[in-house]
Image (tube, rainbow, N blue to C red):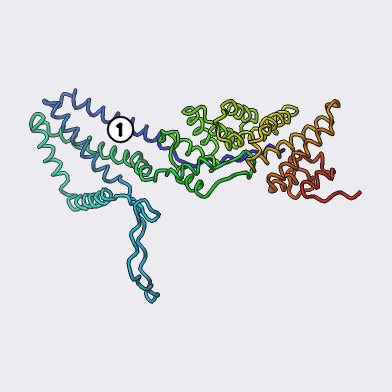
Amino acid sequence: MADKKSNIDPANKSDISADFKRTYLFFYGFVVLGMLIVLFGQWSAHPTAALLWALASLATGGFVGFLFGIPKVAQPDAPAAPAAGAAVPAPNPAPAPAAPIGGAGYRLLVNTNLTDISDWLTKIIVGVTLIELQKIPENLNRASLFIAYSIGGPEQKSFAGAILVFFSVGGFLGGYLFTRLFLTGAFFRADQPNLTAAGAAALRDAVISQESGSQSISGDAEAAARQIVNKRLDELSSLEEIAAWAKAQLIAKNYQAALDGYNKAIALSPTDVKLRIERAVASSGAGLPRDLVKEQLLEAHKWLTPQTDPKVKANLYKELTYAYLYLAPPEGFTGTIQYAKEFLADDNNVRLGRVVAKIYTNLACAYGQKFRWSRDNDPNVDLKTVRDNALNAVKAAVTIDPSVQAQLRMLLDPEFPNKDPEENDLEVFARDDDFREAVGLPKLKP
């Protein structure tokens, strides 16, 4: 079978943490330098009072910067009024009942009071400043003189003015930048709806395979994935959230992010077989070496117990038998045959339906690989027995799930339309009428 590698499509997210750290370090140095000058300079007779005025100026400037930096929150628009001349719907005889708490029509809106206050105050501040622009030097001089009396006398007016300007401007810049760089993202993350229990369950049950196009994702799982995929991994702490986030990244084909999530989840729950299977699928999607994918699945295999969910167990064997098919012969087909037989030896496993059909399909491909390799390299192998085993696996797969017949037909028929030339595991039996009949192809003419 072809070793197809999925293209990595990482989420295009801008990481502002580095910008925030640089801003923080600059601002920290800025403030510390000013405080040292205030405390240890020879300009003030009362350095403690000067320090308090510096902190007051810093806090005032920071508060104004915070007001200017608060992001606006877009609220849903109210239903538009009907256009002039448009037909107005007849009023209902009775008003519809309010949506129940937690019901489908119920939702909470973000409280924007702080945003509104910020908007009003910033407009007032800008307006008053423009009107009183000519009086700013006079007011600054009066404020400086007022501060000077508390730190040593009128002769300290210049130093007091420097404190007022330095720390007010620094506080404003710090408040604005920290609000924009940190609080905006924090507000956004806080306003994101939490993943519901139903969404987490849907994501947990979603099955994604190494095999291209082999996915079982419900609409609920897709909705839950969209809900959590844009969160940051370092914001999550519970195992359920981290596992759901990793699955959402896997569904979105953000394979490296998914691997980071699964590694973190497995560190919290090393015995979780399902997490280990999904990490192997993410590794396969990321194009990591097939040997690594196989080792990850074998590690999951070690954690199987009699209490393991039968569906999880079946999915593990499906992924394991599929992964071995991409390894070099004879290791590849030998591993697939070994683990397929191990799974199918338990009659209870055969009742699991479609997943078992996939395992039989992988087994048929392994026997096809073994037939070709043994014919060319090992004359001691009974090729008829290998052929019969392959045919029996094909028939079992089709009997359990007729939908796999199309895949088997593609693997058998070298002239299948748009076929990948490397998907050729069963082509060695292409002229065998028993195989052709099993996959729905016409027999060859004598």
Expressed as whole percent of the image width and height from the top left, the position of residue 418 reads: 73, 49
Image-based side of 268 in relation to 122, left or right:
right
Q: Quadrant of residue 24?
A: top left
Please tell me how many numbered marks the rendered image carries.
Answer: 1
Question: Which one is in front, 375 or 351?
Answer: 351
Expressed as whole percent of the image width and height from the top left, the position of residue 383 reads: 84, 32
**How many C-alpha atoms fall within 10 Å of the one at disc 1: few (<14), some, or many (≥20)?**
some
At 58% across and 38% down in the image, what residue appears?
Answer: 311
Expressed as whole percent of the image width and height from the top left, the position of residue 102 reads: 36, 51
Q: Quadrant for the N terminus, please.
A: top right
Question: Which one is in front, 311 or 266?
Answer: 311
For the residue marked with disc 1, what is the amino acid? Phe
In this view, the residue farthest toward the bottom is: 85
Image-based side of 32 in relation to 427, left or right:
left
Q: Quadrant of residue 165?
A: top left
Expressed as whole percent of the image width and height from the top left, the position of residue 87 reads: 40, 75
Which residue, given by chain and number where applicable, does mark 1 sit on? 27
Question: Which one is in front, 103 or 34?
Answer: 103
At 55% across and 35% down in the image, what residue appears?
Answer: 309
